[in-house]
Amino acid sequence: MNRPHLRRLAALLACAAGLCVLSSSQALACACGCGVFDVGTSSLFPSGSGGQAFFEYDFMDQNQNHSGPSSAPASDNTDKEIRTNFFTVGAQYMFDHAWGVMVEAPYWTRTFKTDDGTGVIDTFNGSAVGDIRLKGMYTGFSHDMSTGITFGVKLPTGDYGNPNFDRDTQIGTGSTDILLGGFHRGALTQDNAFSYFVQAQWDEPVASHGGYTPGNELDAAIGAHYNGFTADGGKLRITPVLQVLVSQRARDRGVNADPANSGYTRAIVSPGVEFGMGDWSVYADVEVPVYQYYYGDQLVAPEAVKIIVSRDF
């Protein structure tokens, strides 16, 4: 299958750090959670029929308290750290130039550190399957499939019953979400050496459990990559990538949510590179916030990293 050099751009907006955190003066100390939100990747930029399988690894260590547009004292937040390894396996298949499907199945391992109210820091660990995403896509607007729309659902398959985690810290949200998005790619130069892409996705929870509904979210990305570097006689493709990721998340809702300490606006700069040979590719990037505004007190990560291995079939 003929695909663009870039197989998997950063899916998420690296992980949305932070949901609710109550101050130490309150009876319940919620922790800020984290989810991997997918605005679409280059796998959604197909140029022909066929399939692709991929494995993705993300890492994020939320260890800095943030309030409003700036950092805040750690003493304002009873939660001290959330360190998460994200593992995702998935596949995409294009039946023809117009229609395709995608599935993503995550598994997370998480360490959560919080003050028990007496100054003692408790450490809890959890590992579980996350919320599975099923998507369809339509790319029949033009012959080159450069423009498409995506639509699907996030299922409540993730575990949200860990007794040591708050609802916003759980690996699963317990919600069923509708996912709607779109993308467009094009050439910046006549020889197609420089290319650009834009994409966006809306995530709207429509059903929830246990008195907790995560805030709806809009994620978008704009970026460019260079296709002209090769090595090993042209067999190895080297593709530098630069993208800006923006997300807007509303406050959480429900009796087990903390609206005052959830929701954010954020912009991230993400330089990355992909190496491709034959049907295989390896992509890696680092994602660094350049603007953050968080309601209340929330734990954030200074950066996130991503590695993706994919194969066309």
Image (cartoon, rainbow, N blue to C red):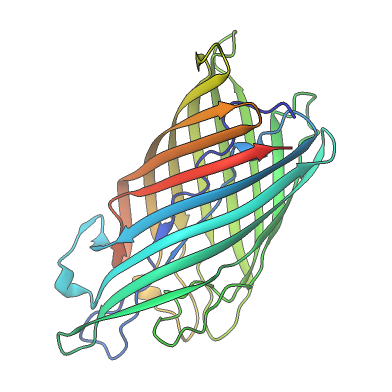
Residue drawn at the location 45% of the way across and 51% of the way down? 247
> Quarter of the image holding residue 113?
bottom left
| Residue farthest along the right direction in this orientation | 96
Residue drawn at the location 78% of the way across and 36% of the way down? 50
Residue drawn at the location 44% of the way across and 34% of the way down? 243
Query: The C terminus is located in which quarter?
Result: top right
Compared to 107, does 283 lie above or below?
above
Q: Position of residue 131 (x, y in %)?
A: 60, 67
Compared to 1, does 66 lie above or below?
below
> Quarter of the image holding residue 20?
bottom left
Q: Position of residue 298 (x, y in %)?
A: 30, 67
Q: Along the horizontal axis of the image, is 297 left or right of 4?
A: left
Q: Along the horizontal axis of the image, is 41 left or right of 303?
A: right
| Residue farthest along the front direction in this orientation | 232
Residue drawn at the location 56% of the way across and 68% of the way down? 130
Query: The N terminus is located in which quarter?
Result: top right
Compared to 282, does 267 lie above or below?
below
| Residue farthest along the top direction in this orientation | 190
Q: Position of residue 64 (x, y in %)?
A: 23, 61
Q: Along the horizontal axis of the image, is 170 left or right of 199?
A: left
